[in-house]
Amino acid sequence: MYIVRLIIAYCLRGSIYVGSLISQLRGYGPLANTCDFPPDEYILVLSTKDKRSIRVNVYNPPTFKGKGSKGKYPVHINAHGSGFVITTLFRSDSEFCRKISRETGAIVLDSDYAKAPEHPFPAAYNDICDVVAHVLANRDGNYDTSRITIGGFSAGASLALVVSATMPKDTFKAITAFYPVTNLCLTSSERPHHVEANSRKLPRLPPFLLNYFLKTYIAQTTALDDPRLSPHNNTPSAFAERVLLVVCEFDPLRDEAIALGNMLQREGKLVRVVDIPGVLHSWDKDINVGVENDLKRAMAYDAAAEVLRSVY
């Protein structure tokens, strides 16, 4: 079974992005051009668990005066979507990262992470933790370690949520999670699909693909109640005080993310849920599909910038 999943993974990786490939066939538009928003530099963070490094693209704010300068800047750590499997999505959030660096004054660290099946759970989680440890070490002196935030998209948003909940309390001031998978233990039959069923569009994240991603990522020996695996496995008090959840009307992950938001609100967390109408999972990565889509992307990204500014 492992060999079969490995072959499937490599076939999937032949496209730039599975969701984008499907969307192009259906006329929804291609993946956004990441070349328009290049990083200022990149760094390599050594993995503490494996003999490899983690690439991190760095987006500096306009006020950045260079390494070694006396200025200290807030830091936002971003993790891209991938289904925990697709290796070619790193940099797919470049537009978002550049916007956040420009509009909040933060240094944005857009982190890659290990993918299954070569590196199943908890390798991706460990990589993001290593990047957080790099920030806390603050060797160049430019990170304000009292103002760290974390976020991501899809699988990356799930990683951001579990990292925020399992690291020491008050490490993070806020979380920005775009269409996260929040309960990795649900099967297709258990996962609510009524929202997507009401859409006239074919699903961006069909059950067979979501199931493949999760079964490839989660080894059979994994304890499904491991707090590093699913945001829902953690106590609400463990999360950051401010949480932004951006969900999509026609996304099978929508309802479980809203359920997490409700759970955090009952704990007293400041939670903002932005429910984008009429869109599919990862809609913000589509381009050339009209002004309405661009406006919805801008609204969601503006919400993230607003939350981050409020804690910086």
Image: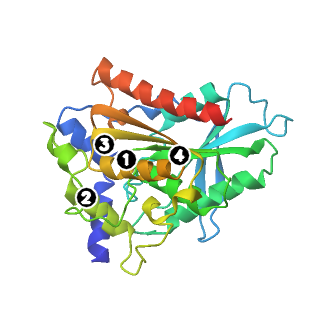
Q: Nearer the viewer, mark 3 or mark 2?
A: 2
Q: Are marks 1 and 2 in contact (CB under 8 Å)?
A: no
Q: Which residue is mark 2?
A: 191
**Amino acid type, label 2:** Arg
When asked about the image quadrant of residue 169, the answer is bottom right
- Furthest residue to the left? 200
- Marks 1 and 3 sit apart, C-alpha to C-alpha, by 14 Å
Which of the two discs, 4 and 1, labels the residue nearer the N terminus? 4
Disc marking residue 258 = 1
Can you identify the residue that label 3 sits on? Answer: 281
Q: Point out the image quarter for the C terminus.
A: top right
Q: CA distance from mark 2 to mark 4?
A: 23 Å
Q: CA distance from mark 3 to mark 2?
A: 15 Å
Where is 164 relative to 291, above or below?
below
In the displayed orientation, state which residue is furthest to the top.
291
**Mark 4 belongs to which amino acid?**
Gly
Q: Tell me the element at label 4.
A: strand
Q: CA distance from mark 1 to mark 2?
A: 13 Å
Q: Position of residue 111 (x, y in %)?
A: 56, 49
